[in-house]
C-alpha cells in the first residue's frame, strides 16, 4: 500500500476544512462588503420614525397618559384632583399626545444614532458565530476525511 493512498483522506480533510475557513474569511472579514449589509440603521430609522409607526404607538401612549392623569397624579397630588375635571383631563391628554407625536421621531432617531455609534455589529456577529463556524469547519474536515477514505477505497478496488 502506498503512502499516497494514506494521504488522500488527510488531504481531503484539509481541503474541506480550508474551504469552509476561506469561505468564512471572505464573507465576514473582507475589507469590502460581500453584498448588501444585513441591515441598515437608516432603514430602521425610517421605519421607526415614520408617522404611521408613531400613530400605531399612540393608543398605548394615550392609555398610559389617561391612567397617569386619572390615577397616579391624583394619588401623588390629591389637591390637584379636586380642581381637575373630565374636560381638563381631556385637554391635558390632547396636549401631551400632540407633544409626544412631535417628540417621538426625534427622540427615537437620536437614540438610534447613539446605538449606531456604540454597537459594533461586526464584533457581535463574530462572537455569536464563533462556535457554529468552528463546528462547521470540523464537520467539513470530517466529511472531507470520509470522502478521502472513500476515494482511497475506490482506488484500492480499482487496482
Image (cartoon, rainbow, N blue to C red):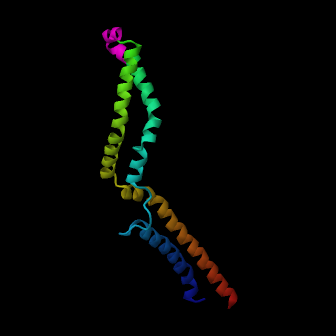
* Residue 23 place in picture, x, y as percent: 47, 71
> Is residue 139 covered in magenta?
no
> Is residue 82 covered in magenta?
yes
Q: Nearer the viewer, residue 123 or 46?
A: 46
Q: Nearer the viewer, residue 28 or 68?
A: 68
Q: Which residue does the image show at 44% across and 66% down from the upper left?
A: 35
Q: Nearer the viewer, residue 141 or 42?
A: 42
Above or below, 132 against 51 in this view is below
* Residue 5 place in picture, x, y as percent: 58, 85
Above or below, 59 against 5 in this view is above
Labels in figure, total = 0
Residue 159, quarter of the rendered image: bottom right
* Residue 61 place in picture, x, y as percent: 42, 30
Q: Nearer the viewer, residue 5 or 48?
A: 48
Q: Which residue does the image show at 35% across and 26% down from the upper left?
A: 95
- Residue range highlighted in magenta: 71-83
Residue 147, quarter of the rendered image: bottom right
Question: In the picture provided, is 4 more to the left or to the right than 42?
Answer: right
> On the rendered image, what quadrant is the N terminus found in?
bottom right
Asked whether the viewer can see residue 71, the reply is no
**Secondary structure mainly formed by the magenta segment:** helix
Q: Which residue does the image show at 47% across and 74% down from the upper left?
A: 18
Asked whether the viewer can see residue 121, the reply is yes
* Residue 64 place in picture, x, y as percent: 42, 25
Residue furthest bottom in the image: 159
Above or below, 123 against 62 in this view is below
Amino acid at each position: 500500500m502506498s503512502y499516497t493512498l494514506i494521504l488522500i483522506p488527510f488531504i481531503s480533510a484539509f481541503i474541506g476544512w480550508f474551504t469552509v475557513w476561506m469561505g468564512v474569511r471572505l464573507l465576514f472579514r473582507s475589507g469590502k462588503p460581500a453584498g448588501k449589509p444585513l441591515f441598515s440603521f437608516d432603514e430602521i430609522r425610517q421605519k421607526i420614525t415614520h408617522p404611521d409607526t408613531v400613530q400605531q404607538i399612540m393608543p398605548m401612549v394615550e392609555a398610559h397618559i389617561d391612567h397617569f392623569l386619572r390615577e397616579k397624579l391624583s394619588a401623588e397630588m390629591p389637591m390637584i384632583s379636586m380642581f381637575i375635571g373630565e374636560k381638563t383631563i381631556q385637554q391635558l391628554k390632547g396636549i401631551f399626545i400632540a407633544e409626544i407625536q412631535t417628540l417621538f421621531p426625534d427622540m427615537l432617531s437620536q437614540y438610534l444614532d447613539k446605538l449606531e455609534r456604540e454597537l459594533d455589529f461586526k464584533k457581535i456577529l463574530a462572537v455569536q458565530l464563533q462556535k457554529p463556524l468552528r463546528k462547521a469547519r470540523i464537520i467539513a474536515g470530517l466529511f472531507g476525511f470520509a470522502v478521502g477514505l472513500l476515494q482511497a477505497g475506490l482506488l484500492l478496488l480499482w487496482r
